Image (cartoon, grey):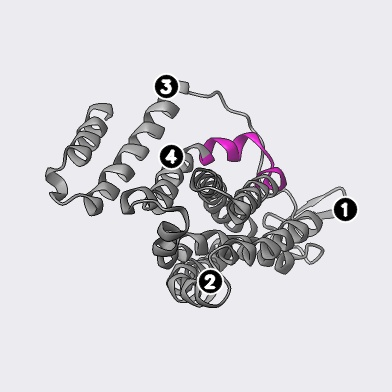
Amino acid sequence: MKENNGTKKYEYLADNPDVKVMPIMLSLIIGAFFAILNETLLNIALTTLMEEFHISLPTVQWMATGFMLVMGVVIPVSALLLQWFTTRQLFLGTMTVFTIGTTISAIAPTFPILLVGRLIQAVGTGLLMPIIFNVFLLIYPPHKRGKIMGLIGLVIMFAPAIGPTLSGIIVEYLGWRYLFITVIPFALFSIAFAYKYLINVSEVTKPKIDILSLVFSTIGFGSIVYGFSAVGESETGFLSPNVYIAIIFLDLLE
């Protein structure tokens, strides 16, 4: 805390009594909870989707594999975006992308459209998590970060843990489309809440973009996620060409 022209300047927003920190936390936590919830929410519904769209098991598994693959690809990009856009722009943008993907999935008439919506969801989820951690680290001083990170960790662990159970209940009594429909109001609430209360806490520096490193890291993360995801889908495990080719390709990039 420093004096500047007779006014107090706070190093961390949590120390500033004029800043409403709890609404900021609430909007971020709600967004994080429902974004992460979608990682496991669809697992129980895969059989239902196979019957609904008359598709095979390897095809429907792309709802899970594709989600993780896209997340692995976009997470490295988030570090760059955090320095090119403000906190408000990034959070509102990623939650809007997530909501669009959820809406597309909810009304999808065919499986390809459903998969596209699911992958758009993954883009929003992959970009959202680094933003949330970055905001909390900038808001709270070091001696308070342990408690806050513990709270966020609880949300991150709790959301995917209840996903399969919640999915089974929703599919049984409402239908698979409500796996997406029930998420939309909460996503919209998080956007509205953040629009009203979220303030910019990061500094926009717009550093030079190393295109080559960005491409290599994106391909590398995508390869390792795809390789390990393909292990569960293959009868030969790590001996499957899909697995070891992806992992060898990752080693070549390194």
Q: Is residue 155 above or below residue 130?
A: below
Nearest the eye: 93 or 105: 105
Which residue is identified by label 4? 73
Which residue is identified by label 1? 6
Q: Are marks 2 and 3 in contact (CB under 8 Å)?
A: no
Question: The N terminus is located in which quarter?
Answer: bottom right
Reading the chain from its start, which is encountered first: label 1 or label 4? 1
Q: Mark on residue 212?
A: 3
- Identity, as a three-letter code, of the amino acid under mark 4: Val
Left or right: 192 in relation to 249: right
Q: Which residues fall within the magenta stretch?
A: 78-90
Nearest the eye: 175 or 253: 175
- Identity, as a three-letter code, of the amino acid under mark 3: Leu
Which residue is identified by label 2? 151
Q: CA distance from mark 2 to mark 3?
A: 37 Å
Task: Tell me which secondary structure the magenta stretch mostly adopts.
Answer: helix
Residue at the image position 56 percent from the left and 47 percent from the top: 117
- Identity, as a three-letter code, of the amino acid under mark 2: Leu
Residue at the image position 72 percent from the left and 65 percent from the top: 21
